[in-house]
Structure formats: C-alpha cells, structure tokens
C-alpha cells in the first residue's frame, strides 16, 4: 500500500507568505489592522505572532493588532494568564473582558440552551464572536480567525457563526502539526507549543476527549483520502492503524469508557466530519493564504 505523504514547510518562507496574505487582506478592506481572540492556545498564539510579524514588516502603514481575551466561567485562570503572557511577549495592545454576564443574559431568550452542555458551549462561542466582530467594526479592523486546517477544513471542528465567523484565516492552510512547528520557530515556547488543545466551551473539555483521537490522525486520514486511498485501505494502513490503536488504548486508560472500539470506526468518523466540514464551508469560507509545501 502506498505511503501517505505529509506536507513539509520552510517556516521562514511560509511566515512571509502568510504575512503577505494578511497585508493584502487589510489593504483590500482598507482597514487599520486586525483583532484576534487570544485563548493562550497554540493556534491563537501562532496566528497573533504571524500577524504581528506582518505588521512589523510594514511598519510605515501603522497597522495594529489587538488581542481580546474573552473568558467565560468555564475558562481557568491559567488560560487567561497564558493569553496575557502571549500578548505581552508580542508587545500588542490587549484587553480582558469576561463574557459570563452577556452569556447569562441569553437566559431571557434562549433558556433551553442552558439545559444542554453542547448548545450552551456553542452559544458561548457565538457570544465571543459577537464581541470580537463588534470590536473590529468599531475599531475599523477585521477579525483574524485562529482555526487550523485540521479543525476547520478537515473535520469542521468549530462553531458555525461562532469562532468560524471571521474575515480571514491566516493559519487555515496549516495542519495542527505544522502550527506547532511554526509556533516553535516563532519562539513562543514549549508551554504554548505543547499546550493541550481545548475549545474551552465545556467543563474539563479537551479536543482529544471530545473527538476520541488527535489531530495527527485527522491529518493522516484526510491526506490519505485526498491521495486516493479508500476508507478500508485507510483503516488498515501502516501509518494509521498503529497510531489509532495506541490512541484508543490511551483513551480507555484516561477516560475509562471507550469512545471508539476500532480503527475503522475512527476513520469513518473523520470522514463523516469531513463531509460536515464541507457543508459548513458552503456557508462560511474565509480566505486563507496559498502556502508553499513539499510532500514527503
């Protein structure tokens, strides 16, 4: 069975390509810069660092990046500290605003959402998006999304009209693996690079707990599918099967109950979510940069 090829990149070259894309979008919209929601995670931190680099390269234009840290009652204090630390490290203006009160305000119109962890989590994401987009409008800026390729275009792991409601997607072409690589290149530090991915929309939530597998699996299955492998071939592929089996065993150890019991189920779930992602993209599809990759 043929080997699944994964994208490789020259970080400096790709950082310049993303910078040029960001500048083009700001110039096209005739705005004063970007706003970004900072969570302290690797995606938002890398996005902010890349945009700051872009604006520094075009200092004469005096574009500004503003970071907004918008915790709800579900976010830990450490999340806020990490996000603030990134903003200070980059030297950008930032503000911290709790969205707990605006979220609670929706009890008057959407009380049913508070009976479901899932619906409340998505509502929190939409409230956060409303704050960001309104800040952007009043500051004459555009909202930079922080979703990576695996999340947004691989499995659609975002809230429609929530964190997906952005003007541009600077890291939309990078897999989670490549985002971590770029974060290391940009000097964001191991704490940020290796931070456990979480949407922060449910108590003790993590992407791995939610999905049942990590983004390395998403990338391999997605790339293998694009490269012509069938679902059955993917389920027994030497690059996928051992990785998924290890993750299934680890999931059972950590969370006791199994989310999936076979590699085939995981492959089917990734591909099912991929179809959902394509449906979401028909509704909201922010532009992302063209990036130079080699495949090995």
Image (spheres, rainbow, N blue to C red):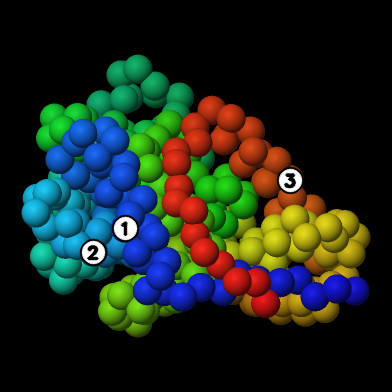
Is there a contact, CB below 8 Å, between mark 2 and mark 3? no
- Left or right of 68? Residue 158 is right
The Cα–Cα distance between marks 2 and 3, rounded to whole angstroms, is: 37 Å
**Percent coordinates x, y for residue 228 in the rendering:** 83, 58
Is there a contact, CB below 8 Å, between mark 2 and mark 1? yes
Q: Quadrant of residue 136?
A: top left
Q: Quadrant of residue 106?
A: top left
Residue ID for mark 3:
272
**Percent coordinates x, y for residue 59 in the rendering:** 11, 57
Q: Earlier in the sequence, mark 2 or mark 3?
A: 2
The Cα–Cα distance between marks 2 and 1, rounded to whole angstroms, is: 7 Å
> Circle 3 sits in a helix, a strand or a loop, which is it?
helix
Judge whether 39 appears above or below 246 on screen: above
The numbered mark at residue 61 is none
Q: Quadrant of residue 121?
A: top left
**Percent coordinates x, y for residue 112 in the rendering:** 45, 24
Residue ID for mark 1:
19
Quadrant of the rendering where the C terminus is positioned: bottom right
- Left or right of 254? Residue 119 is left
The Cα–Cα distance between marks 1 and 3, rounded to whole angstroms, is: 33 Å
- Left or right of 139? Residue 188 is right
Quadrant of the rendering where the N terminus is positioned: bottom right
Which is in the foreground here, disc 2 or disc 3? 2
The numbered mark at residue 53 is 2
184 vs 289, nearest the viewer: 289
Q: Is residue 125 visible?
A: no
**Percent coordinates x, y for residue 193 in the rendering:** 38, 75
């Amino acid at each position: 069975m043929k080997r699944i090829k994964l994208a490789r990149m020259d970080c400096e070259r790709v950082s310049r390509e993303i910078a040029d894309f960001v500048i083009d979008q700001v110039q096209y919209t005739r705005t004063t810069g970007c706003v970004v929601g900072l969570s302290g995670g690797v995606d938002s931190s890398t996005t902010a660092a890349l945009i700051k680099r872009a604006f520094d390269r075009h200092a004469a234009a005096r574009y500004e990046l503003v970071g907004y840290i918008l915790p709800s009652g579900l976010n830990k204090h450490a999340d806020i500290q990490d996000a603030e630390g990134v903003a200070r490290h980059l030297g950008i203006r930032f503000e911290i605003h709790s969205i707990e009160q605006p979220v609670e305000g929706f009890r008057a119109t959407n009380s049913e959402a508070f009976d479901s962890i899932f619906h409340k989590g998505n509502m929190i994401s939409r409230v956060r998006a409303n704050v960001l987009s309104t800040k952007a409008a009043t500051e004459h800026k555009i909202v930079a999304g922080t979703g990576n390729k695996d999340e947004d275009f691989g499995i659609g792991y975002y809230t429609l009209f929530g964190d997906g409601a952005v003007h541009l997607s600077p890291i939309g072409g990078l897999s989670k693996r490549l985002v971590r690589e770029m974060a290391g290149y940009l000097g964001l530090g191991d704490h940020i690079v290796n931070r456990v991915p979480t949407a922060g929309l449910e108590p003790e939530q993590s992407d791995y707990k939610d999905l049942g597998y990590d983004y390395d699996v998403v990338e391999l299955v997605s790339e293998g599918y694009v490269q012509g492998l069938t679902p059955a071939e993917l389920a027994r592929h030497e690059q996928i099967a051992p990785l998924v089996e290890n993750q299934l065993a680890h999931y059972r150890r950590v969370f006791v109950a199994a989310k999936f019991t076979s590699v085939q189920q995981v492959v089917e779930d990734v591909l099912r979510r991929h179809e959902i992602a394509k449906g979401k993209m028909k509704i909201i599809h922010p532009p992302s940069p063209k990036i130079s990759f080699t495949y090995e």
